[in-house]
Amino acid sequence: MPNPKSSNDSVNVGTPPEDAIVLANSAKPPPGTGEILGGVVSSPASPTFFSVEFRLNAGSVTRPGTFVGIEAHPAQGGTSLVLARVNDVHEVNPHEDALSSTLRNVLPFGTKYASEGHSTVIYRIASAEPLEEAILDDDGHIVTVRAVETLPRAGAYVVEAGAELTAKALGLEQDPNAGLWVGASAGDPNVQIVLSKNIIQRHIFIGGGIGSGKSYTRGVVAEELQAFGICQVNIDVNGEMVDATAELGGMNFIPGKGFTIPLSALSPGDVTAAVPSINPGTNMYTLLQFTHEYLLREVAEGRRDFFMVDDLVKQIDHCADTLEMKQKGTIEPTKLRTRSLNRLKFIGKPFDWAGALKPGAILNINCKGMPVAELRLVSASIARDLQNLARNGKLPFVALSIDEFHLVAPNDDNVVTTQVLREIARIGRLYKLGLILTTQSPSDVDRAILKRLLTRFLHAIEPDQLDALKGVFSDASEDLVRSLPKLPQGTCIVTGAFETVRHATVVKIRERTTSHGGKTPDIWTDIAKAGWPSKRYTKVKGKGK
């Protein structure tokens, strides 16, 4: 029987073999990484290619969403670091299990025990999900990043990933001037999150409940895009971007005041929906649609630049003859009801998009207080105008932004704005047109649009909305998704496709340089200024002292 002390598997006896595991407390991490947090432990669930558990050193801190590097040794030799995302941490303390805790409360004497770092039975275990593998050179610098091919061994050190490893593994930029700097990693404030500037060509989604910080994030994105000279057209449903637009040198418009759209920017369906008491299947409906289509053809053929409500009314007689409609009971009521379009103050001459959209321009269309039906008309018209101009190469790249877009593009095939935005989401990048869509109610938006927004900022949101976000969580773990409703204000989970954000990460959004128009009003200061500075009860006669 062999002597155990002479076995190659023995420890602390003689010189260790060349392939011996280097224990975490004696290892030297590669340059660019942070402190050693602990070492990989062996259990039925760890280490595997899907989960690695590690014991935290006393005093080390990590939290869900933190990125760590795990020492690994590829079969072909050398050293690598497996980038992993921490999902959860739990403590093991047999002195505080249910039985021990009960005994301490019942028995008449106290119990003292050593704390973590001095006790041999108290420790914390973190679980992490391997994401990428960085191959290191002899000096410990990153050579390349690839999919995980090497299984970390038990006993390997676990280190704070650091900025370089995190950026390369997530497909981020390291220089804030090279991309969209949106904030810092919530797990490591030293790791700045700088997204590729090309994400705007793959469309952006910003979701979150009331007061979660989504409109604040929209402002950060606006600042970053403007710094790169990207043109932005913002349909501002609540008037939250008015101040920021002015501060960035942009222009604010109110539909009907300095900003109008022609009837040629509306579809026949838009027009018939906007005219009261003209119902599908009736002669009036057919006549109005035919007349509008007739004038649209004239615009397309260059016979007129645009047309107004009066032009549409005048053309009804001619089109009635073409359709052999002779009944005055059809023609005159159609003309009369079509004139009601004049109530829409935003119908007018075409807006000079090509003249206004120069590099760095921000055009904010303030639609605060506008009825939903009119909001959809304005949004559809703007989207269609931009789409047509972009398709014909008459515009630079434009980012079209809509907040509360569940109002504009609901999950309804019959809503024209939904149809237009679907088309832009599908092929807009080919025509140099990007989308930034914000909502507090993803369950109400069109799914075909939502799934094509390939960079997503997910703020705290009500649990009943989580089902609607399935498919946009990317590789966010169940633990991260479960934490979503409880994220603090200004913190979000950023996910995306491989070409935008490779792996979900928790981000603390950076401070804005522009004013935030979407913050919750301070009603208590207003009440105090009005003479009611603190809580006080009204004295009722005959009641109380």
Image: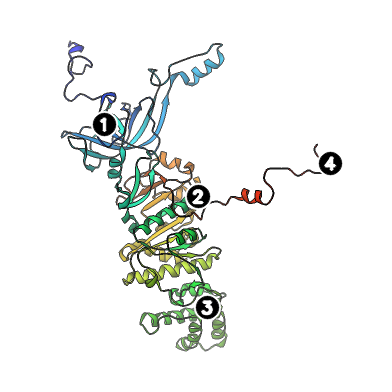
Q: Amino acid at mark 3?
A: Thr
Question: Does residue 451 show up?
Answer: no
Q: CA distance from mark 2 to mark 4?
A: 46 Å
Q: Which residue is mark 1?
A: 29
The residue that appears at 45% across and 51% down in the rendered structure is: 468
Q: Position of residue 171 (x, y in %)?
A: 29, 47
- Quadrant for the N terminus in the image: top left
Label 4 CA crowd tier, 10 Å (few <14, some 14–19, many 20+): few
The reply to whether the C-beta atoms of the residues labelled 4 and 3 are less than 8 Å apart is no
Q: CA distance from mark 1 to mark 4?
A: 76 Å
Mark 3 vs 1, N-terminal side: 1
Quarter of the figure with residue 153:
top left
Mark 2 or 3, which is nearer the eye?
Answer: 2
Q: Amino acid at mark 4?
A: Gly
Label 2 CA crowd tier, 10 Å (few <14, some 14–19, many 20+): some
- The answer to which of 144 and 413 lies nearer the viewer is 144
Label 1 CA crowd tier, 10 Å (few <14, some 14–19, many 20+): many
Q: Relative to 92, is 333 above or below?
A: below
Q: Relative to 386, is 461 above or below?
A: above
Q: Which residue is mark 2?
A: 209
Quarter of the figure with residue 222:
bottom left
- Quadrant for the C terminus in the image: top right
The reply to whether the C-beta atoms of the residues labelled 1 and 2 are less than 8 Å apart is no
Mark 4 or 3, which is nearer the eye?
Answer: 4
Mark 2 vs 3, N-terminal side: 2
Question: Does residue 346 show up?
Answer: yes
Q: Which residue is mark 4?
A: 542
Q: Position of residue 455 (x, y in %)?
A: 37, 52
Q: Amino acid at mark 1?
A: Pro
Q: Which residue is mark 3?
A: 282
Q: CA distance from mark 3 to mark 1?
A: 77 Å
Q: Secondary structure at mark 3?
A: loop
